[in-house]
Image (cartoon, grey):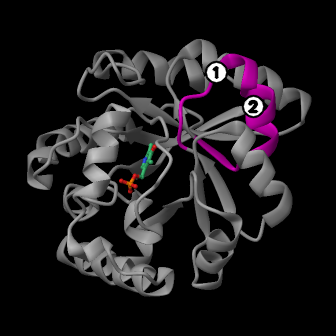
């Protein structure tokens, strides 16, 4: 999505995002997650909520943590580093944005899960840096499910080969898949992409690749997380609907 689009989208947010209280927003999101989970026969606690805090101030993040948020998602290394230094680790921090190889060293030291691993060479660099820190870095493989030139991720026909290769890395542990499908103004239109991701997730689980755990399927954002859960997501990444519209455009 272009920054231009993101700004115009924010200015047209429906009333349900206009609530001023982070506390109320989180309560509402959690209830909607519960309802969506129950409809698919899942327990509400099986769905992980990642509060996307990019561009959000530290005081608002603390407020969200006080309201029970346990996972925060950031997409820029410098910004995350500053926040993690002051807020620390009463919560888990996930990297959800594209990672450049020259920043892997910092990312491995800072994050509990890197959701945006999109190439074998990036996984290899993460492995090398994690080894030095004596850490096993948990990651999700990002799939470019809409095959968009503007988005990162492995193509779905390359996923199995990538999983095989990453499984050979001792200091990287695959925990599932992540995708950001093409933006659809009507959330239901994202269903085929979510559905295909669910198929890939199940296919990957069936391969029983040693060292690859298919625990998390990270799909769905503020405007479409209920559809994502209906199609099998067990991790959703929600920013705007918790913290309100972002004023500074932030690259996906
Ligand atoms: C910003 C971002 C989100 C959250 O988007 P909202 O529409 O504000 O909920 C989710 N996932 C990724 C990868 C993002 O960059």
Label placed on residue 78: none
Quadrant containing the N terminus is top left
Q: Is residue 113 magenta?
A: yes
Q: Is residue 18 magenta?
A: no
The residue under the point 56% across, 58% down is 53
- Residue 120 location, x and y as percent? 56, 15
Q: Secondary structure at mark 1?
A: loop
- Asked whether the viewer can see residue 252, the reply is yes
Locate residue 97 relative to residue 5 in the image: left or right: right
Looking at the rendered structure, which numbered label has been put on residue 100? 1
Q: Earlier in the sequence, mark 2 or mark 1?
A: 1
Pointer 2: what residue? 171
Q: Quadrant of residue 42?
A: bottom left
Label 2 SS: loop
Q: Nearer the viewer, residue 13 or 33?
A: 13
Above or below, 106 against 48 in this view is: above
Q: Is residue 113 above or below residue 24?
A: above
Residue at the (90%, 35%) spot, across then down:
133
Identity of the residue drawn at 82% across and 40% down: 109
Q: Position of residue 19 (x, y in %)?
A: 36, 81
Provide residue 175's location: percent of width, then percent of height: 54, 44
State the CA–CA distance, disc 2 to disc 1. 18 Å
Q: Nearer the viewer, mark 2 or mark 1?
A: 1
Magenta region, residue range: 96-114
Judge the density around disc 1: few (<14), some (14-19), many (≥20) Cα neighbours within 10 Å. few
């Amino acid at each position: 999505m272009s920054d231009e689009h993101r700004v115009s989208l924010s200015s047209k947010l429906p009333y349900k995002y206009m609530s001023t209280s982070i506390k109320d927003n989180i309560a509402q999101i959690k209830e909607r997650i519960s309802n969506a989970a129950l409809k698919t026969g899942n327990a509400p606690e099986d769905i992980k909520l990642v509060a996307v805090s990019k561009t959000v101030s530290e005081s608002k993040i603390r407020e969200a943590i006080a309201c029970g948020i346990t996972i925060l998602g950031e997409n820029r290394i410098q910004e995350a580093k500053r926040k993690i230094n002051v807020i620390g680790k009463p919560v888990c921090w996930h990297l959800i944005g594209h990672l450049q190889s020259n920043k892997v060293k910092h990312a491995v030291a800072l994050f509990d899960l890197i959701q945006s691993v999109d190439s074998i060479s990036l996984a290899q660099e993460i492995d090398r840096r994690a080894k030095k820190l004596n850490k096993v870095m948990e990651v999700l493989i990002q799939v470019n499910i809409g095959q968009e030139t503007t988005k990162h991720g492995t193509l779905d026909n390359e996923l199995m080969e990538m999983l095989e290769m990453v499984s050979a890395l001792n200091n990287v542990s695959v925990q599932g898949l992540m995708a950001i499908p093409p933006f659809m103004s009507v959330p239901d239109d994202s269903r085929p992409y979510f559905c295909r991701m669910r198929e890939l997730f199940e296919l990957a689980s069936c391969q029983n690749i040693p060292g690859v755990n298919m625990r998390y399927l990270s799909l769905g954002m503020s405007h479409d997380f209920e559809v994502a859960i209906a199609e099998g997501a067990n991790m959703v990444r929600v920013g705007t609907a918790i913290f309100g519209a972002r004023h500074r455009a932030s690259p996906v």
